[in-house]
Amino acid sequence: MGIIKKLHPHEAHKIAAGEVIERPVHALKELIENSIDAHADRIDIIAEEGGKKLLSITDTGCGIAPEDLPLAIARHATSKICSIDDLTKLDTHGFRGEALASIAAVSKLTVMSRQAGSSEGAMIWAEGEYVSEILPQATPIGTTIRVEKIFEQIPVRRAFLKSAESELRLLTQLIIPYALLHPGISFSFTHNGKTIFEYPRVGTIAERYAQVMGSSVAQAGIPINRTMGDTKITGYCIRPTQKRRDRNSIIVAVNNRPVKSSRLIGAIARGYSAVLEQGHFPIAFIHLHVPPNTIDINVHPRKEDILFLDARGIEESILYTIRALFAAERTAAARPWAEVSYQAPSIQDQNIKPAGTFSSIDTPPPFLYRAEEYPSYGPMISKSTNHDRKEQNASLIEIPDYRIMGQYAATYIMLEGRDGLILIDQHAAHERILYEKFRNRQEDMAPTVLLFPEQLSLSPHEIALVWSYQEIFERVGITLDQMGPQNLIARTTPVMYKGRVQDIVIDLLDKLKTERTAPELLKETLLERVCAMMACKAAVKAGDQLSVSEMHTLIETLYKTENFETCPHGRPTQWNIDLADIERAFKRR
Ligand code: ADP
Ligand code: MG
């Protein structure tokens, strides 16, 4: 007996739809594009639970005639093309005519619409197989579409949805590029009753850019406008003083469509490689304008990625444009980008002459004290006997006996150990000490009211994240309030924290953006990060000259910490150079 059965068309449709609409953000993308195609000048988006409970979008576009409502939600029905030939001269977003049908297949979809000139609007709703009648409905001119119960009938898909916070982040990241590309449209986004952002319509991309990025980021932006052959590149590159830990702040568009091209994003990041240290990514918005016949926008079912006839050429144009931008800026300003911090002089920098004289006047000579200033050639301090912690736990790492020899390059403390030389990184060591102190003393995390509240400038999706994890921020002593659409204001900080609240918030957000742990563990992780941050800000820096007694205290306290071998970020605090290795180097062995 045969086992192959033809699927009911409705089931087939559900499966096909699932390929395109896998999560709420995919539905929202289609809905926003429909509103833009309908020439709306205002788009208001509402979501609940990251879109899992509700997505609603209201526009002021051309509306849909009541008799067209059933067609709008039917498959392969579109007002945008009549024949395949139209595909080539397409300047709208849609054209497959299946978005609304696909959304209806996996949710309850309600469409309410009224065209200009008609006295009354109409509505229709569809859920799975069922489609309602056309019903009269009082509604303003334009269209409102509601998507509820998404994937309720398809539990496997629902199970794949992420947390409400993660889905919310995807929604915010989706809307931003459209807002940037369409300054003439007002955009608002409300989540669980809270306004995430509101951008009134403006006349220029520059104004919209400032609305979206916040004033401090926008001020660090260099506008781009460059034509190379038939490719034009516009947008903004933010100076590397503002940077992020992930690629999410790199926005790319091609011919007015946002695209998620990892190749283009990679090219932008590489353009910054000379001015950004490793592990950091730029904030940039790059809009490419290319002849339509040199791209294929149909490679991706959701039209998210794009295929270029000459991908290499495009990448090189981007790379070149960004590099040239910063090269020009640098010559003009003749000053380095990064905040100048003291760097331990390396052999190359110092140009050390064989005779042992120091040629550079700018960099401090490696030895800041003469040997006789160190009264440390006394008896070796013995640590390895009778140490309480060792007795408790035999597997603990050996604590060395040592004698302080001095400070090298105002950064490393040199110790003579029993079996060789020990170099201690003074910053890493102090960080470890302070970190353990803060971890053990919760009162250091208590909020203290700032005399002058600090204004933080964050992107909208970062602000959305802050609100999702507000309780955690408060738990670590940071109280934030909204101040205008782009800015937050910090009213309290952990009592022992001595830096900018912006730095700590960005650090925590970087963690939250990538974190996949359970909320309870997350709290712990964030607490640890705040402690690490407080420790980092408060610790002695590379380049700080230490007195002998300061070095003594530092080393003594370091060896009393739980994990003295690494700093809270995982860098080693010490480097042991075995006597045997020294002997081998001198061919004594
Ligand atoms: P497509 O966008 O590919 O045409 P859709 O399923 O997204 O297909 O939409 C079907 C049709 O419904 C559109 O062609 C358009 O005529 C109408 N429509 C959908 N959304 C809107 C809207 N927000 N305003 C006006 N018309 C709309
Ligand atoms: Mg569409």
Image (cartoon, rainbow, N blue to C red):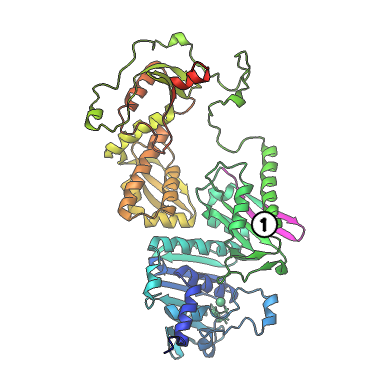
Across and down, in percent, residue 349 comes to: 61, 26
Q: Read off the residue under disc 1.
A: 234
- In the image, residue 68 sits, relative to residue 550, either above or below, namely below
Residue 455 appears at what percent x and percent y?
45, 46
12 vs 250, left or right, is left
Please name the residue shown 56% across and 25% down the image: 345
Q: Amino acid at mark 1?
A: Thr
Residue 441 visible? The answer is yes
Which residue is more in the foreground, 442 or 45? 442
Q: Quadrant of residue 437?
A: top left
Give the magenta part as a residue range.
224-240
| Residue 206 seen in this snapshot | no
Q: Nearer the viewer, residue 43 or 266?
A: 266
Reply above or below: 414 against 327.
above
Please determine whether, in this image, residue 405 is positioned above or below residue 288: above
Report the residue that reaches farthest toward the top.
372
User: Residue 484: where, in percent of width, then height?
Assistant: 46, 55
